[in-house]
Image (cartoon, helix red, strand yellow):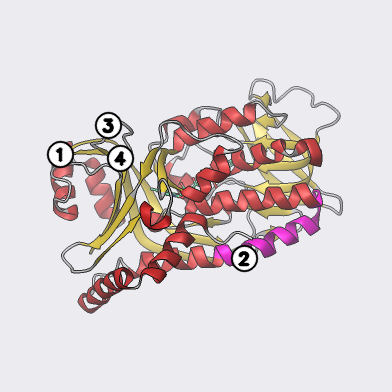
Amino acid sequence: MQIETAETIGHAPPADYHFDIAIVGAGPVGLALAGWLAKRSATSRLSVALIDAREPGAASADPRAIAVSHGSRAMLESSLGFPADATPIKRIHVSQRGQFGRTLIDHDEHGLPALGYVVRYGSLVTTLAQAVSKTGVHWFTETTASTPLHDHEGVTLSIHSATGDRTIRARILVNAEGGLYKDADASSAASSDLSAEVKNTRDYGQTAIVGTVSVSSPQPGVAWERFTPEGPIALLPSGGARQADYALVWCSAPEEAARRSQLPDAEFLTELGSAFGERMGRFTRITGRATFPLGLNALNALVDRRTVAIGNAAQTLHPVAGQGLNLGLRDAHALCDALSTNGPTTVALSLFAQRRALDRRMTIGATDTLARLFTVDFAPLAAMRGLALSALELVPPVKTVLARQMMFGQRR
Ligand SMILES: Cc1cc2nc3c(=O)[nH]c(=O)nc-3n(C[C@H](O)[C@H](O)[C@H](O)COP(=O)(O)OP(=O)(O)OC[C@H]3O[C@@H](n4cnc5c(N)ncnc54)[C@H](O)[C@@H]3O)c2cc1C
């Protein structure tokens, strides 16, 4: 990999700063696309530029724990690698606080070693960055991109760093610069104006507090999704050998999340215990608290002339079903296929958009429904939710269809 740093970016550009594909955003989705394209470049011969506002390694401190589905892990591991410190999820326990009804999803029912794996965002980005660094991808770090100009042949893109501005040419521009969540990390990047008009938006009026908690009676390999009147609480096994550690995602009204994020540890743990209950004993420790605003932002059209959006730049989802990254990785995989097979053409982009339509519709729809259905504090609705959870237990095929959608999505 060739890395352009902020120190060298101001130098006179080589004459051939023309790429087949320029990817803006080296988050997990942009990195996966760059790595997959590079792996296939022996046959496709595509040249790839990767542009990110952060310095390499800046993401490694991101405290977010992400549940990567079995299907996503399979896509990554065989080609780019997977973090060694991932913790397997063997069973998912879904219930609602103070109401009847619960459902269990178990890896045995699906004949898989695990339903998914919990990884740290920083750990995943580091693994993917290492894989990309061994390829011919040309990486501009600490560099932002803005204002693409389209013409018949491609796109001209202005890029900016501390030491200067430059333009590069690409036949296809991929917007992988993330979305709503980058607000939580204001240092990550300036907004770049690559997005087409957002059509499908919803403000859930919720903010997530994330962090790592320890519990007194852990249940190894079990992930918990607990719906409370304030919003869902997810606890994901995340400690590897330290089985008492769980990654917390606690969704509530923004003002409550702001208040709780400032509480002394002991008070925070007491409130969490009251909200979640005692299924894993007491909460004994919290570290790495951070907050993320939550909402739905989905583009109706992924393609605008020679620009295409993937990952959170295409759709930013509520984390209730743990689908954002998984959907984004499927975007990247399908785009790699389309570009490697059809070249850096508008035909490739149209085929990509067609191929992604069903999976996007189903995953965005299911996540949005869950986020709304399970966050309304209305007694009759709570009873219906209890019935729905119980019904899933009684009608195994429905549960299987749901679980498989979450683990593999719709891939064609
Ligand atoms: C609390 C929480 C829990 C979550 N849990 C899960 C889960 O369990 N499972 C799951 O699948 N998903 C989960 N998600 C969603 C997941 O984090 C995102 O879907 C995923 O990070 C999207 O990756 P991305 O690469 O598209 O974007 P990002 O991770 O946002 O990366 C974007 C990159 O683009 C760069 N960038 C931005 N603007 C510019 C610019 N102008 N120029 C250059 N570079 C730029 C940034 O520096 C960054 O490196 C969760 C999200 C949250 C907030």
Marker disc for residue 357: 2
Q: Amino acid at mark 4?
A: Gly
| In this rendering, the label closer to the viewer, 3 or 4 | 3
The verdict on residue 344 being magenta is yes
Q: Which of 64/145 is in front?
A: 64
Magenta range is: 342-360
Give residue 100's position: percent from left, percent from top: 18, 69
Cα gap from disc 4 to disc 1, whole angstroms: 17 Å
Counting residues from the start of the chain, the first of labels 3 and 1 encountered is 1
Q: Amino acid at mark 2?
A: Ala
Cα gap from disc 3 to disc 4, whole angstroms: 15 Å
| In this rendering, the label closer to the viewer, 2 or 4 | 2
Q: Amino acid at mark 3?
A: Arg
Cα gap from disc 1 to disc 2, whole angstroms: 44 Å
Give residue 12's position: percent from left, percent from top: 79, 24
**Residue at image location 65% in from the left, 20% down from the top:** 7
Q: Which residue is mark 3?
A: 242
How many other residues sit within 10 Å of disc 4, few (<14), some (14-19) or many (≥20)? many
The image quadrant of residue 30 is top right
How many other residues sit within 10 Å of disc 1, few (<14), some (14-19) or many (≥20)? some
Give residue 214's position: percent from left, percent from top: 22, 37
